[in-house]
Amino acid sequence: MEDLRLMIVHLEKTCPFDLGLTLCCGQTFRWNREGEWWRGTIGDNSVKIRQQNGAVEFYGVSKDAVMTYLGLTDDLLKIYSEINRDQHIRAAVEQFRGLRILRQNPWESLISYICATYKNIASINRMLNNLSRQFGERIRTENHDFFTFPTPKKLANASISDLRKCELGYRAEYILKTSKKVYENNYNLDSLKKKSYEDARTFLLQFPGVGLKVADCVLLFGLGKLEAFPVDVWMRRVLLRHYTSHFPKKFVTKISKEESLSESQYKQLNKFGREYFGKYAGYAQEYLYHHERMKARKQR
DNA sequence: CAAGTGCCTTTATC
DNA sequence: AGATAAAGGCACT
């Protein structure tokens, strides 16, 4: 049962925050808009939330949890000045001011981004909602039911055919193997927050279905490693369109071909992003990513 | 409206 | 190291 008390976080006038943008920019997959309200989960709590008149209003979870989850503890103005390296990132930041990096549950992030490989966002949403309906706990709310994200135990004990019913495709095996590994070793993924970016990444790369890109997404969106710089097809486009002068001509020609990135190519692009944008490279990535996707959408 | 392309890639193999 | 292929199926054009 969700907590029915209305909670309010008042934002300072200088504090950039855009709830809708933050929830629908593609970093999280299980929030639904209902009029001016958003419904989803934070931890295992069913949450209803909206932004109004410089305040965030919500039900179902503590103020601290909301502040942390929404990234409201980040000094966004400082981050903007740190990543403000050129005209292009400046335009993206200006257009999507108030977009914040969420601090999602690391376990849910891990499974989410294994699902996300080679899929579009609409499909990813479907897969994760299917998984939650099949294997999560039902939470009753005023209007309709919601589901928590399944635990490692639950997914580790699932059958491959039940997983496949969630439209996971070949990812079903990765999900099963990764879940078993986490469950059987009793891994606490939250403890990775204390590790360095590199050490946490090494740990994540042991899981089936996790390569450099997925690891970077979990590091950024689940573990709060703001220096992570995931490079997907959109980021490759951004880098090829606006940042080619930072790479050798031969390299640019090679990655311009429509093929997936090799490990070394990924590392080269990732290294550039982290060095060029600095310790908040992850924020730069998310603004550039969203900027590029919205441009593509407009052109239709 | 059918068919083709694209999708926040990873893994296996040579 | 680098190239190549295979792995759902939905959404969009």
Image (cartoon, coloured by chain):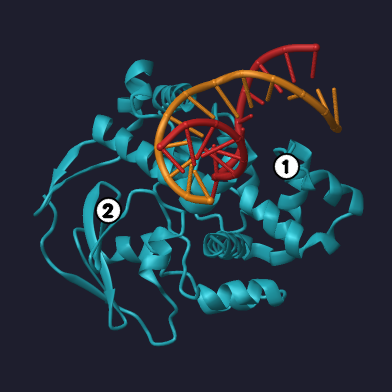
Chain colours: A cyan, B red, C orange
Residue A227 found in image quarter = bottom right
Near-viewer residue (A159 or A59): A159
Near-viewer residue (A57 or A170): A170
Q: Mark 1 or mark 2, which has the lower sequence index?
A: 2
Residue A153 found in image quarter = top left
Asked whether, in this view, residue A84 is left or right of residue A176, the answer is: right
Callout 1: few (<14), some (14-19), or many (20+) C-alpha neighbours within 10 Å?
Answer: few
Asked whether, in this view, residue A196 is left or right of residue A158, the answer is: right
Asked whether, in this view, residue A160 is left or right of residue B11, the answer is: left
Q: Nearer the viewer, mark 1 or mark 2?
A: 1
Element class at badge 2: strand
Mark 1 residue type: Glu
Q: Chain of mark 2?
A: A
| Badge number at residue A211 | none
Can residue A141 be seen here?
yes
- Residue at the image point whose x is 40% and y is 28% from the top: A186
Mark 2 residue type: Gly
Q: Give the residue at mark 2.
A: A40
Q: Position of residue A59 (x, y in %)?
A: 18, 63
Q: How many marks?
A: 2
Asked if residue A220 is positioned above or below residue A132 in the image, the reply reads below
- Residue at the image point whose x is 44% and y is 32% from the top: A187
Q: Position of residue A114 (x, y in %)?
A: 50, 35
- Residue at the image point whose x is 41% and y is 70% from the top: A72
Element class at badge 1: loop
Q: Position of residue A236 (x, y in %)?
A: 69, 52
Near-viewer residue (A34 or A81): A34
| Badge number at residue A258 | 1
Residue A183 found in image quarter = top left
Asked if residue A13 is positioned above or below residue A161 in the image, the reply reads below
- Residue at the image point whose x is 34% and y is 26% from the top: A155
